Image (tube, rainbow, N blue to C red):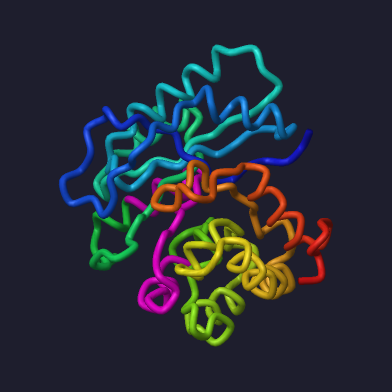
């Protein structure tokens, strides 16, 4: 039992949600259900990522981490929060003591921030001092607009969902090419949510099309820098409906499952 789920969410529909959200969930994603799935599949733990529709209100995620710390379990859990750029270092330290290891910039379908200026300087300095990573959720075609600045300023940068390359030409997407050329000691990419990369396709077919992306990312960054995640509970894609299905995708990408040569 040594595998980690590097990308999962917990939330309730009753929580206050940001007014400009792109999506409103139709089901709850309670911690207890996620824990049962992890135990059933002999997973060593998970990273809980703040979902976009909750904005910077990280209270539910932090409460989940607190509950987990009080539970007698061999599993390990960490959190990735969303914070404002002017979040104080002391506040970040308190989040770290609760089990937070990174912060997420969820910029999918959103205007890109101007990272110049003292506010962002202090932000990245604090993140690096704490040993946190910055997690970026952004469309691959727009990655070149932000990635060089982030790689320069972040000691640890994690990219969501294969970097979301252009589905029409994924391996020729400028964003993916930048990921392959980036300093591997600073960069990690999540192998997760193939249905978000190739939207409109059957999820299993989308997974097969992500296999070459997984292979070239591993070749460029090394296997320890390509992180599998379930993306549970598959917001906007409830038809996935199977944790074991996402595990099988990971096995196939790594060449350890029945479709390892796909």
- Left or right of residue 252, residue 71 in this image: left
Which residue is more in the foreground, 177 or 7? Answer: 7
Which residue is more in the foreground, 86 or 218? Answer: 218
- Left or right of residue 50, residue 113 in this image: left
What is the count of numbered marks? 0
Which residue is more in the foreground, 261 or 177? Answer: 261
Instruction: Specify the quadrant of the image occupied by residue 171.
Output: bottom right
Residue at 35 percent across and 29 percent down: it is 12
Residue at 46 percent across and 32 percent down: it is 96
Relative image position of residue 256 (x, y in whole percent) = 83, 57
Quarter of the figure with the N terminus: top right
Residue 196 drawn in magenta? no
- Image height of 34 relative to 221, above or below: above
Report the span colored magenta: 123-151
Relative image position of residue 55 (x, y in whole percent) = 27, 43
Residue at 58 percent across and 47 percent down: it is 230
- Image height of 235 relative to 182, above or below: above
Relative image position of residue 98 (x, y in whole percent) = 46, 25
Relative image position of residue 81 (x, y in whole percent) = 39, 40
Residue 129 drawn in magenta? yes
Residue at 52 percent across and 22 percent down: it is 32
Q: Residue furthest left?
A: 19
- Left or right of residue 195, residue 13 in this image: left
Quarter of the figure with the C terminus: bottom right
- Image height of 225 relative to 241, above or below: below
Q: Main secondary structure of the magenta part?
A: helix
């Amino acid at each position: 039992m040594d595998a980690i789920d590097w990308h999962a969410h917990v939330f309730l529909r009753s929580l206050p949600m940001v007014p400009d959200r792109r999506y409103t969930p139709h089901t709850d994603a309670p911690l207890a259900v996620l824990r049962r799935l992890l135990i059933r599949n002999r997973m060593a733990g998970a990273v809980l990522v703040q979902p976009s529709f909750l904005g910077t209100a990280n209270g539910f995620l932090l409460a989940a981490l607190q509950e987990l710390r009080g539970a007698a379990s061999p599993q390990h859990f960490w959190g990735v929060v969303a914070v404002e750029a002017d979040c104080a270092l002391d506040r970040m330290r308190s989040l770290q003591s609760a089990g937070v290891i990174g912060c997420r910039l969820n910029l999918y379908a959103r205007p890109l921030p101007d990272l110049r200026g003292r506010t962002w300087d202090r932000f990245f300095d604090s993140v690096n001092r704490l040993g946190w990573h910055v997690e970026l959720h952004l469309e691959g075609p727009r990655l070149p607009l932000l990635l060089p600045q982030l790689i320069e300023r972040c000691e640890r940068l994690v990219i969501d969902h294969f970097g979301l390359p252009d589905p029409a030409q994924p391996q020729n997407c400028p964003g993916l090419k930048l990921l392959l050329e980036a300093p591997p000691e600073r960069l990690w990419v999540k192998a997760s949510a193939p249905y978000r990369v190739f939207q409109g396709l059957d999820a299993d077919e989308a997974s097969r099309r992500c296999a070459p992306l997984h292979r070239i990312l591993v070749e460029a960054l090394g296997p320890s820098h390509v992180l599998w995640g379930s993306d549970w509970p598959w917001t906007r894609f409830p038809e996935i409906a199977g944790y074991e299905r996402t595990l099988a995708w990971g096995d196939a990408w790594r060449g350890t499952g029945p479709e390892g040569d796909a």
